[in-house]
Amino acid sequence: MAAVHDSYLGMVEEVTYGTAVAVARFLEMTGEDLKGKYERIDSEAFRAGQRVLHKDRFQPNPKGAEGSIKLEGMDSGLGLLLKHALGSISSGAPTGGFTTHTATVGDLRGKSLTVQVGRVDNAGVLHPFTYTGCKVKGWELSNAVDGVMNLSFDLDSAKENIGAGAGPLAPATPTYSTTAQLFTFVGGVVNIAGAPFGVSDISIKGENKLKDDRWSTVGKREPVEEGLREYSFELKGEFEGLAHAQRVAALLASGTIAAVDCTWASPQGGELKLTIPVGRFDAGAVNFDGAKLIDHALSGMALWDGSASPVSVAYKSKDATP
């Protein structure tokens, strides 16, 4: 008999969009809300005496699935999601038991995942829910003082497969890294224009602007990008002087821009470094609120300089491959 403690999250990269593959990578999760979307196509015709829709005059209309998975940042296991969140990833040579995988902004076409969630009912039976054709629509990395790095990935899926089936739809047997360590506030450093900024809370978000409603008589087509991606940041710290306030208020576009570098290190030497080479600072007011230190909440967005990736993540991991 299973218990809720036997719930699991597994994933694997697909070869063909929407074609299930048996999940092979398992990540520790804090929660998920993946769920199928099921619509109904109702008749609008009328028969004598009818005051309610007739039982035979509608058609079930499955419309894929969507939702998010929530994880904690660790120095193992995240490379695959970073690749599918940003679009491209390259790996360096192994050094001292670690390999650095660098994710950069790239083409998301042809990149999809099979994701399986094991959920346990109140009778102690574990049921696999398998989501095929999963694309990362958006993501968030956040960390507050005294806390663990949190990661959330918003997924769009071509289909929800409920319950055990053959092959890749069968329940998986989870296995986990035995060497992974957490990224926490203790190992975090934030620099703005190369100078440290003491943050108490940080959030960085990405929106991939996928067109996820490409339905036709052939089913759901792979979501593709339309419009411009958006990468935003929020950094909360103390009012340390005028530099950041003046950056927000600058009259020249060039004066509003500065690089943002955020680095987390694990106790054993793993590292996640997120770099925004061109960050535009859009807000950052400072206000008195009683006889206490003044907070300074800065926010803005990543821009492109025409060459460097607008956002990159160098992930020094125990994993030999992403």
Image (cartoon, rainbow, N blue to C red):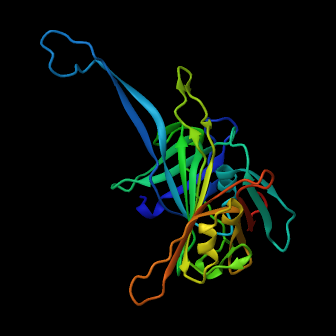
Between residue 23 and residue 301, name the one nearer to us.
Answer: 301
Task: Give the left or right position of residue 202, taking residue 280 as reference.
Answer: left
Q: Which image quadrant for residue 214?
A: top right
Where is residue 53 drawn, in percent x and y? 22, 21
Q: In which quadrant of the rendered view does residue 94 lie?
A: bottom right
Say above or below: 108 vs 139: above
Q: Is residue 197 left or right of residue 95?
A: left
State the residue lying farthest toward the front.
Answer: 251
Expressed as whole percent of the image width and height from the top left, the position of residue 36 reads 44, 41
* Placement of the N terminus among the 4 image quadrants: bottom left
Q: Position of residue 100 (x, y in %)?
A: 79, 65
Please name the residue shown 41% across and 27% down the image. Answer: 61
89 relative to 148, above or below:
above
Q: Looking at the image, which residue is at 64% across and 63% down? A: 251
Q: Is residue 182 visible?
A: no
Relative placement, left or right, of 219 versus 91 is left
Q: Nearer the viewer, residue 316 or 27?
A: 316
Task: Please tell me in which quadrant of the rendered image residue 273 appears.
Answer: bottom right
Q: Which quadrant: the C terminus?
A: bottom right
